[in-house]
Amino acid sequence: MAAAFVDREGELASLEGRYGSGRLEFVVVYGRRRVGKTALILKFMEGKPGVYLLARQTSEAENLARFSLRMAEALGDRVLAKNPLRSWDAFFSYLSRLDGRRAVIALDEFQYLVEANPSLPSVMQEYLDGELAETDLFLIACGSSVGMMERISGYGSPLYGRRTGQILLRPLRFHQIGGFFPRYRWDDLVRVYGILGGTPAYLREFSDGLSPLGNLRERYLRPDSLLYMDAPFILREELPDPRNYFAIMEAVARGRTTLGEIISDTGLPRGTVGKYLSVLRDLGLVRREVPVTESWKSRRGRYRLSDPYLSFWFRFVHPNSDLIEAGRIDPVLEEVRAELDSYLGPIFEEVAREAVLEACRDLGLSPSRVGRWWGKRGEEVDLVVLDRRGRVALLVEVKWADLSGKEAAGILRNLRRKSEGLLEGYRKLYGLVARRLEAAVRGADLTLDLGDFDRIWGSKGDPAGRADRSVGRPDRLG
């Protein structure tokens, strides 16, 4: 089956806009493995002269020889086919002679090229500032190691200031995954999102011909499956010694969200935990939250894993790897079945945030800050939207549950009680988001359940024309 290409209109528009400049462009595209970087680049290259070059973890000479062959095929250059380029100086000098063709040259897995020759960024700097500066070449450097790609193009690197564009490709958001599963209802989409997150390659592993738990049995909880094996693979690419990182991430996945709880759960020294959390945050694997009313310096920060795929893997898969390796899937599935609704609570809060921000338009709100709030005595509000310009605060409780009218009214009363003394000077609005609301909720300024999602996002989040499942190869040069 062809690779799915869903959404990404913003990133495509950014690349197309730069392509129309008619001048030299050097764009860095990076993001975690499987997130869809290659599909984005190939989609962009459709109908354009160019060549896509995929680096391997091999010698510089072998990569240059393959690149020479690919370019010779695209250009019809028999001389290049028989005399491959033997250095990066020769490679970029050759590209400088393509001026006038508006060629797209995409170097994928760029970090492998730098590993083989750390001087490559310096060589590129020289040519970007020199022979390539007046050409109309469109050069893309794409990489899957987030840390390395940020170092390559960041401050202190020879390439700092040379890129004309940069795209950090993130996983799809919840409302964008419906194009992969047209037969699923919204509740099943929430379950799938809680298991896989928004990484396109993972979403393609599931089929809407099976239930989410059926997919878990058949396509995930097997030692030979991509979904089972990929989490440690991608983490080991970023983290040279992942043992302590794994311990920290597993603790966070189990709900140990404060620094003290993580230290107690892992048994690691405070300094070690703080240092490792800083690395995980820099890589985008963990995020730190503070109460929405406080600054980022607040000492009451809490930590969460940034990706539902990793949250699920560390919560259910990693602790049960011995059972999975032994083929004892039923006990793992029973644990998932018993605890899935509880696990999905925080996931549904993220889904609700997307929905509420869309609904804010109907309330006339212009959100300036969005987040959770918690107090010193344990009280919490799942979602707070602040409109600082209008001095309005929308406070929302989120429940992954089917609520009767009586239950919903009680939750709303408790929300009003918790908000007493909070956000003085703001006009307060109150809302509730649930899996299903069985009756209207009096006194609420906003109520949403899964039945409202079609109105907010269109059928299954897949408006007409959004899903394009055919990604072709770029046209030949010439």
Image (cartoon, rainbow, N blue to C red):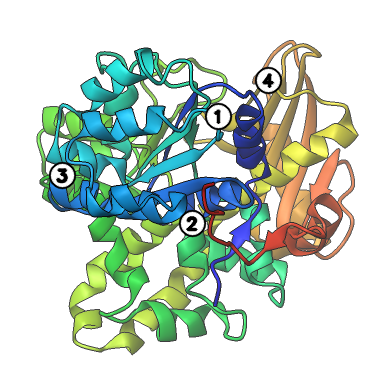
Q: Nearer the viewer, mark 2 or mark 4?
A: 2
Distance between the Cα atoms at labels 2 and 1? Answer: 37 Å
Which circle's residue, 2 or 1, is located before the other in the chain?
Answer: 1
What mark, if any, has residue 70 been given in the picture? Answer: none
Instruction: State the CA–CA distance, disc 3 to disc 2.
Output: 31 Å
The residue beneath circle 3 is: 60
Residue 199: which disc? 2
> Hey, what amino acid is under mark 4?
Ser
**Label ID, residue 100:** 1
Q: Is residue 381 left or right of residue 417?
A: left
Q: Which mark is residue 368?
A: 4
Specify whether residue 70 is in view: yes
Query: Mark 2: few, some, or many residues within 10 Å (few <14, many ≥20)?
Result: many
As helix, strand or loop, the secondary structure at mark 1 comes to loop
- Closer to viewer: mark 3 or mark 4: 3
Q: Using a 10 Å C-alpha cutoff, classify the residue at mark 4 as few (fewer than 14 neighbours), some (14 to 19) or many (20 or more).
A: few
Tell me the distance, in whole angstroms, between the alpha carbons under discs 1 and 4: 46 Å
Q: Name the residue nearer the viewer: 247 or 259.
A: 247
